[in-house]
Amino acid sequence: MQKSIFEISQMDCPSEENLIRLKLADISEIKNLDFDIPNRKLTIFHFSKKEKIGYALAELKLGEKHLETLEVENQEFSEDNHQRKLLWTVLLINFAFFIIEITTGYFSKSMGLVADSLDMLADSFVYGISLLAIGGTIALKKNIAKTAGYFQIILAVLGFVEVIRRFVGQVEIPVFSTMIIVSIFALIANGICLFLLQKNKSSEAHMQASLIFTSNDVIINLGVIIAGILVYFLKSNLPDLIIGTIVFVLVIQGARKILSLSK
C-alpha cells in the first residue's frame, strides 16, 4: 500500500473536501482519504494509480501539488457510520438558509443576500450529490452534477443581469439592518456546519481558528455584513451591488467545480 500526500492550496472548507471525495470516488484503488483542512493537506492511502489520482485532482483546479508518496503496511479503514446523517444535517442547514436569504434578500432589495443564498444553494448541491453518490451509480452522480452546475450558472447570470439593472436604474437602497442580521445568522450556520463536518477529526485540528476564518462561506457572510454597514453610512446601494457581484463570481467558480464532477 502507498501513502501519497498532496497540498491542496484552495481547500479551505468542507465543501472542497466533499468535491474531492466525489471526484476520487471512481478510483477503486483508493482505500482511505485523510483531510487536514487547516493545513490544506490531503493524505491518500491507495494501491498504485498515483498518476490517475493526480490527474483527477488536477481537473478540480484546486491548486493541487504532490508532496510525496511512501510505501506503508496494509491497513484496515473503518467507514464513518455517521457520514449520511452529517451530510443530511449540513444539507438541510444550507438549504434552509438558501430559502431564508433569497426571501429576505428579495424583500430587503439586497443583492448581497441573494448572491449569498446562491452560495448556500451551491453547498446544498454538493452535499446532495454526495448523499446520492453513497447509494447511487457513478452515472447518476455525474448527471446530477451536470444539472446542478448548469442550474447554478443560470441563476448567477440572472443575478448579474439584476445587478446591472440596479446599477443603471433608480432602485431603492437595501434595508441594511436585514442584511446584517440575516448574515450574522448565516455566519453562525456556516460555523455549525464546519464544526459538524470536522468534529470527528482530531480535537486540535477542528479547534484551529483557520478552519473557520479561511472558509469562503464565512468570508462571504462577513462581506455582506460590511456591505450592510457601508450602505447605512454611505446611503447608497453601491456596496451591496459590489459584494453581490463578487459573490456571483464565486458562485460561478463553484458551479465549474461541480461540473468537473460530471466529466
Image: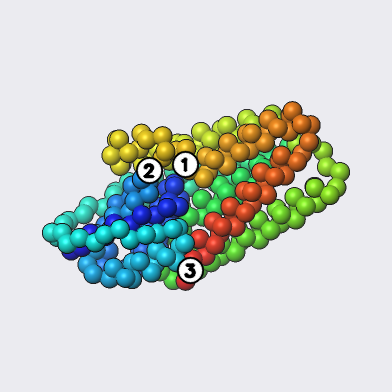
Q: Earlier in the sequence, mark 2 or mark 3?
A: 2
Q: Which mark is residue 38?
A: 2
Camera-nearest label, 1 or 3? 1
Pointer 1 and pointer 3: residues touching (CB < 8 Å)?
no
Where is residue 97 shown, x and y percent of the image?
57, 41
Question: Quadrant location of the N terminus?
Answer: bottom left
Query: Depth check: 168 or 198 in front?
Result: 168
Pointer 2 and pointer 1: residues touching (CB < 8 Å)?
yes
Classify residue 207 by image quadrant.
Answer: top left
Q: Earlier in the sequence, mark 2 or mark 1?
A: 2
Where is residue 87 shown, x and y percent of the image?
41, 48
Q: Label 1 belongs to which residue?
A: 214
Q: Earlier in the sequence, mark 1 or mark 3?
A: 1
Q: Label 3 belongs to which residue?
A: 262
Secondary structure of residue under mark 2: loop
Q: Amino acid at mark 1?
A: Thr
Where is residue 60 shown, x and y percent of the image?
45, 62
Q: Is residue 185 visible?
A: yes
Where is residue 38 shown, x and y percent of the image?
38, 43
Q: Which mark is residue 225?
A: none
